[in-house]
Image (spheres, helix red, strand yellow):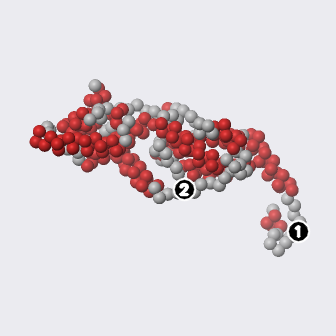
Amino acid sequence: MAAVNAFNQALTRIGFNVDTTEAIIDQGFDTMDTLATVDEKDIDAMIKNVRDTRREQGDDAEGAVTFPFLAIKRLKAMRFWATELVRTGRPLNAGLFHGAEITLAVNRYSTDAIRSEIEKDEDPDKPGELSDLTKWEVFWERWSTYASRLRGAAKCPMTYVFREKGVPDADDFIADYDSHDDYLVAVTVLGGAWYDLDNRRIYDEFKNLVLKGPGWTFIKAFDRFKDGRNAILTLKRQCEGTSAVQTRKASAYAKIASTKYSGQKRNFTFDQYV
């Protein structure tokens, strides 16, 4: 009952009158936990259902049930806020949705909508295939940049899937970040439906770049379950391990040792050699 009352008060704070909050709750939208399980289309359908029902009731419809535009937008922003809390493993507390938090949630909700519209026409450049493990460093930079441009079910850059720290600690939630996206990459839970979808998607993206090269040997064990996180981190550790670094150094030293100056030429002077 306390959760229902808290949600009722939150509906009032975002602009619905008493009759409308009762109508919303009668539709089953009675707690913040429930709101976090629906999508935006469900909210539109709920509002349509209430309006259609009252229209059919005509003069018998009770109360002054109205759905102001801004109140609807705040309700959708509150759902956006609630789902982010779930994805970051924080408790849902309707009492916290007030004042500046409402404004911030509306801004982030609006920004996400604009971003989604823009990204419909975007096609981020994919890195080339990893055909040589000694070129891992360049490949990794290009791969990380590409993955940071992809957004999946978790509503944040998909680099969160293969971050080094599996479970964020308390300090990660209060640290300073350059952007809200960086915060989400650090603290989004690596579990739940959003992660399962994103983990499989990022695996397919990575596999396509590694399949024809020597890196496939190290990640093919993860192919059955499309485990993107473990596939990517396994190859990363293989390529960035001590022996891999030593191999790259040895290769570089060998190239230096085999380089000889055979005299000044028209397009190659001694200054260019050194």
Q: 183 or 239: nearer the eye?
A: 239
**Which residue is at a point 80% across and 72% down the rendered structure image?**
267
Q: Residues within 10 Å of mark 1 (few under 14, many from 20)?
A: few
SS assignment at label 2? loop
What's under tag 1, amino acid-wise? Gly
The tally of labels here is 2
Q: Which residue is mark 1?
A: 263
Using the rendered image of the protein, determine whether residue 229 is visible from the camera's viewpoint.
Answer: no
Q: Which residue is mark 2?
A: 124
The residue shown at (77%, 48%) is: 248
Q: Amino acid at mark 2?
A: Pro
- Is residue 115 among the parts visible in the rendering? yes
Q: Secondary structure at mark 1?
A: loop
Classify 180 as above or below 192. Answer: below
The N terminus - image quarter? top left
Which tag, 2 or 1, sits closer to the chain's start? Answer: 2
Q: Is residue 23 left or right of residue 264?
A: left
Q: Which mark is residue 70?
A: none
- The Cα–Cα distance between marks 2 and 1, rounded to whole angstroms, is 46 Å
Q: Nearer the viewer, residue 107 or 100?
A: 107
